[in-house]
């Protein structure tokens, strides 16, 4: 079967990419050929095993989920013909039965029909203990999946789950698109499947080549159910240094920088022929703490770290005060946004707390982030602030594809402090991040905090569709997170996209990825 898989994948990738021609208002515009720059590279192209924002963006090109997220986080039906509700009969009155209608006529890029059998196979693959699935929440609430026909799935839930539809959404967390049973169904596990690096497509684009460290090249999928994209070719350029990426935008070697770093914003005004879009995104920067590490098990030392660092100064000097200070991991424009105070900047109290734990001894902790210049500037400020407390920091940064990998330092618990950006889906459900039931390898609780209040509250919050009850529960949960200090939230990112103004149809999204409507782009 594996040899068959390789043959089918290679056959599916033989579509030719048209040579670009020069057109548009600018001499540097290549008609029908779009070049997107990214500082990060995917760690895996199988959504079950991928942990990076880059993978979410790439998978949005390759795969068709049941629902995509539009610019404001609303579901956009893709493989599903409608979003289930109480009103249309898609959700039962007891909230435990979900009816999904799949679109007819959809095929994989190798011509095989995509049906409800692929959805059922994906559910089984997510829960297969042989697979190193990054997160199973939502999927593990499905007790059974009946298929009355090839285009209808009836989900029977063990108990109500307010975020179960998010499991079928367009990226992030435990949201996975249907995977091809005809290629993967006979494999005992998917961990090492060739598909993970060269998947066939159900979405608008075919992966032509993954040039590791350099680019991913795409051709239109002629079998995409909406019809092939308007573009003739798409190149995802990997440019790890954000300064270099903005320089390539200035010299028109790339057409799009989807997330200009705060340190590069001042350069945009000098670049001719680009459009600048800004919007609040559901991405939050935080300092995460591994609560299972010996020196960090005591909440007093974690609180000392939170109060010793001038977070406003870091936000203003390193990140130019451009973003919105964060009080929690629920977006400030969410219906469930809680009211939680910021940690005070109080070096004297921080020193008192640290002495109560450490006495006269000193400890050395590691701090890890992605290899971007601004991150190290922030880490150096933290290093200087913590040294008077008897805490020495060793900076140990990684490429994003390594830091967030399933076998990387975060999921293995091989870190002390971690400085990075996380991303939310539209629903406030964060059980997979804070529940003690989702500590790796069972989930994404990489703070390794096992607190019964957080476990119980995050569970209760997804067992009702009543928003008033859920809002009250998230207030309790976020207040508890603040008290236990497994994390310090810094800001919600105001994301800036800069792109060739010959590009049309490109629309930033608050959640997950701007690649949600790539079939509409033209240049």
Image: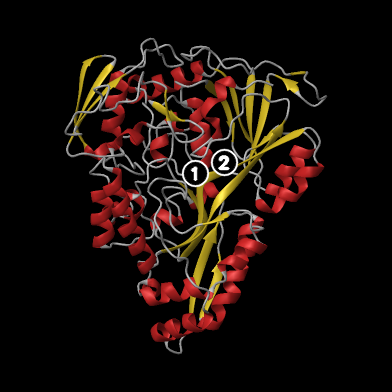
When asked about the image quadrant of residue 278, the answer is top right
Could you tell me residue 385's position as x and y percent?
57, 76
Whether residue 20 is situated above or below residue 483 in the rendered picture:
above
The residue under label 1 is 52
When asked about the image quadrant of residue 147, the answer is top left
Looking at the image, what colour scheme do you see? secondary structure
Please give the name of the residue rendered at 55% of the width and 70% of the height, measured from the top-left corner: 394
The CA span between labels 1 and 2 is: 8 Å
Could you tell me residue 405's position as x and y percent?
46, 48
The residue under label 2 is 41
When asked about the image quadrant of residue 46, the answer is top left
Residue 7 vs residue 182: left or right?
right
Could you tell me residue 515's position as x and y percent?
55, 31
Whether residue 289 is visible? no
Assign the N terminus to one quadrant of the image. Answer: top left
Whether residue 73 is situated above or below residue 108 in the rendered picture:
below
Q: Which of marks 1 and 2 is in front?
A: 1
Could you tell me residue 473's position as x and y percent?
28, 54
Residue at the front extreme, as displayed: 468
Disc marking residue 367:
none
Whether residue 199 is situated above or below residue 7 in the rendered picture:
below
Please give the name of the residue rendered at 62% of the width and 24% of the height, measured from the top-left corner: 505
């Amino acid at each position: 079967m594996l040899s068959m898989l390789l043959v089918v994948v290679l056959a599916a990738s033989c579509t030719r990419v048209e040579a670009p021609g020069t057109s548009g208002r600018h001499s540097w515009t290549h008609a029908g050929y779009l070049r997107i720059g990214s500082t990060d590279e995917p760690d895996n192209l199988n959504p079950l095993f991928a942990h990076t924002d880059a993978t979410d963006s790439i998978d949005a090109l390759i795969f068709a989920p049941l629902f995509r997220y539009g610019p404001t986080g609303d579901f956009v039906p893709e493989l599903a013909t409608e979003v289930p509700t109480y009103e249309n009969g898609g959700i039962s009155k007891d909230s435990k039965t979900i009816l999904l209608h799949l679109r007819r006529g959809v095929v994989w890029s190798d011509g095989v029909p995509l049906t409800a059998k692929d959805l059922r196979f994906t559910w089984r693959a997510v829960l297969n203990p042989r697979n190193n699935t990054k997160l199973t929440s939502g999927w593990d609430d499905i007790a059974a999946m009946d298929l009355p026909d090839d285009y209808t799935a009836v989900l029977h839930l063990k108990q109500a789950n307010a975020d179960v539809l998010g499991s079928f959404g367009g990226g992030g967390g435990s949201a996975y698109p249907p995977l091809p049973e005809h290629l993967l169904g006979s494999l005992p596990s998917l961990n090492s499947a060739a598909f993970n690096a060269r998947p066939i497509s159900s979405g608008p684009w075919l992966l032509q080549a993954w040039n590791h460290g350099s680019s991913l090249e795409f051709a239109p999928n002629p079998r995409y159910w909406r019809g092939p994209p308007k573009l003739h070719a798409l190149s995802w350029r990997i440019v790890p240094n954000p300064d270099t990426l903005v320089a390539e935008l200035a010299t028109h070697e790339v057409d799009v920088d989807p997330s200009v770093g705060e340190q590069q914003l001042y350069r945009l005004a000098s670049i001719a022929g680009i459009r600048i879009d800004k919007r609040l995104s559901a991405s939050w920067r935080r300092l995460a703490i591994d609560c299972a590490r010996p020196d960090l098990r005591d909440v007093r030392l974690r609180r000392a770290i939170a109060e010793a660092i001038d977070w406003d100064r870091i936000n203003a000097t390193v990140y130019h005060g451009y973003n919105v200070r964060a009080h929690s991991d629920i977006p400030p424009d969410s219906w469930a946004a809680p009211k939680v105070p910021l940690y005070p900047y109080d070096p004297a109290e921080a020193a008192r707390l640290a002495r109560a734990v450490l006495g006269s001894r000193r400890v050395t902790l590691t701090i890890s982030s992605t290899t971007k210049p601004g991150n190290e500037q922030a880490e150096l400020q933290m290093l200087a602030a913590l040294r008077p407390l008897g805490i020495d920091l060793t900076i140990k940064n990684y490429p994003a594809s390594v830091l967030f990998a399933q076998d990387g330092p975060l999921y293995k618990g091989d870190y002390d402090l971690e400085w990075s950006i996380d991303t939310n889906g539209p629903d406030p459900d964060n059980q997979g991040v804070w529940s003690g039931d989702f500590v790796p390898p069972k989930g994404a609780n990489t703070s390794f905090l096992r607190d019964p209040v957080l476990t119980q509250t995050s569970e209760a919050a997804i067992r009702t569709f009543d928003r008033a009850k859920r809002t009250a529960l998230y207030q309790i949960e976020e207040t508890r997170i603040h008290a236990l200090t497994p994390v310090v939230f810094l800001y919600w990112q105001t994301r800036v996209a800069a792109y060739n103004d010959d590009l049309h149809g490109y629309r930033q999204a608050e959640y997950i990825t701007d690649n949600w409507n790539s079939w509409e782009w033209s240049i």
